[in-house]
Image: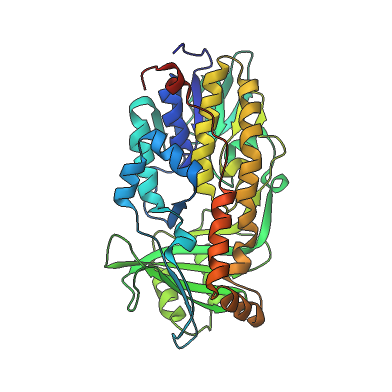
Amino acid sequence: MKKTSNKTVLISGASIAGPALAYWLGRHGFEPTVVELAPALRPGGQAVDFRGAAHLTVLERMGLLAELRRIQTGGSPMRFVDERGRTLLRLPAEFAGGELEVLRGDLAHALYEHSLPRAEYVFGDSITRLTETASGVRVDFRSGASREFDLVVGADGLHSNVRRLAFGPEKDYVSHLGYYAATWQLPHHPGTAKGSVGYNVPGRLASVGADHRDPARAGAFFVFAAPELSYDRHDPAEQKRLVENAFSGLGWEVPRLLDSLRQAPDLYFDSISRADVDTWSAGRVCLLGDAACGATIGGMGTGTAVVAAYVLATELARARDDHRAAFTRYETRIRPYAERCQAGGDRTGKFLAPGTATGIRLRNTLLSRPLLMKWMLRMGERVSTVDLPDHPAERSGADQ
């Protein structure tokens, strides 16, 4: 396949979307570089899922589907209990786990290893300035380095640094949906089994589940309703205080879980929010995944990111030197699909932590009905459908 002259591409973010895009760009003859603020790949994290033909087709075209099936969790059933531990609601594994569920850290590592032969990775650094030139984008880094690339892609999540630099401040694009979520690892918690068990009071959920790989470990997942809070996103101690204050005085297993939080080294804490960007590209800069159209939880963000990375790389390969046409075709194809998926995230907080006791009882009653559960699972599969372009290398018979 003829190589494009727009071939050096800087990707910000080495979680899911970034390595997926790096893989496809490398396969199309581009030279991708991935920059990541963290010093290394982030291990652990919650389980993420894939559902529907589009997700699985892209994973299969990447040669990753069989590997991910080997390391899948097998799904995560959910159980809701009262303060005495009596079961109020059971949800099947496929409700949260889709057709294929893996741990986020395992997926990130698989994508990294898959892309590494054709991509450069720079850890422990970040972009501080983007300056478009006649022939590309000059990028200044926090480390003091400066390099020029043909194109830049922001695959750096809901709080995207690239979006802030190239499009404007986060407040113009990210909307708070009224909830916050926290996750952390802890030593094995008595009574945890496959999946998770959760306890609700109005506006709050405290849950814990067994680690899928290590029986000596467990994972906590807390959600609480709150107006938008002002806090330091890089200060875990402050974030721990916010969680403790929100759940202080609750019963069930909450006191023991909060005790484990004080010792946890790996807290994830963030608002449940969504990103809405009118146009996903500006000149030679483009947004991908949650940076463009993200939802913190429940918006099928992982599957959407993998599919969108495939489409963006394919359109860039087809367009040769016309990145503007590629960006337009990518957005036209992916935006309606991504927005359908994203809409599910609007309901996540209210589903996990209804604001009233009546809301909790109503959720438990409705989801106990098998027919409603089957309908919801079918709807999830329908939402995650998109018309995928053919891989140019597959059509031409070029070396993959």
Image coordinates for residue 7, horizontal then vertical, percent: 49, 18
> Eyeballing the image, is 265 above or below 302?
below
Q: Quadrant of residue 334?
A: top right
Give the side of residue 342 with respect to residue 21, left or right.
Answer: right
Image point 41% across, 39% down: which residue? 59
Image point 45% across, 53% down: which residue? 49
Image quadrant where one finds the C terminus: top left
Image coordinates for residue 340, horizontal then vertical, percent: 64, 48
Res. 267 visible in picture:
yes
Image point 63% across, 78% down: which residue? 362
Give the side of residue 39 with respect to residue 233, left or right.
Answer: left
Q: Which of the pair 13/398 is nearer the observer?
A: 398
Image coordinates for residue 246, horizontal then vertical, percent: 57, 74
Q: Which of the pair 26/133 is nearer the observer?
A: 26
Give the side of residue 285 with respect to residue 42, left or right.
Answer: right
Q: Quadrant of residue 369?
A: bottom right
Image point 41% across, 24% down: which residue? 27
Q: Which of the pair 192/120 is nearer the observer?
A: 192
> Eyeballing the image, is 392 above or below 199?
above
> Eyeballing the image, is 85 above or below 316?
below
Image quadrant where one finds the N terminus: top left
Res. 14 visible in picture:
no
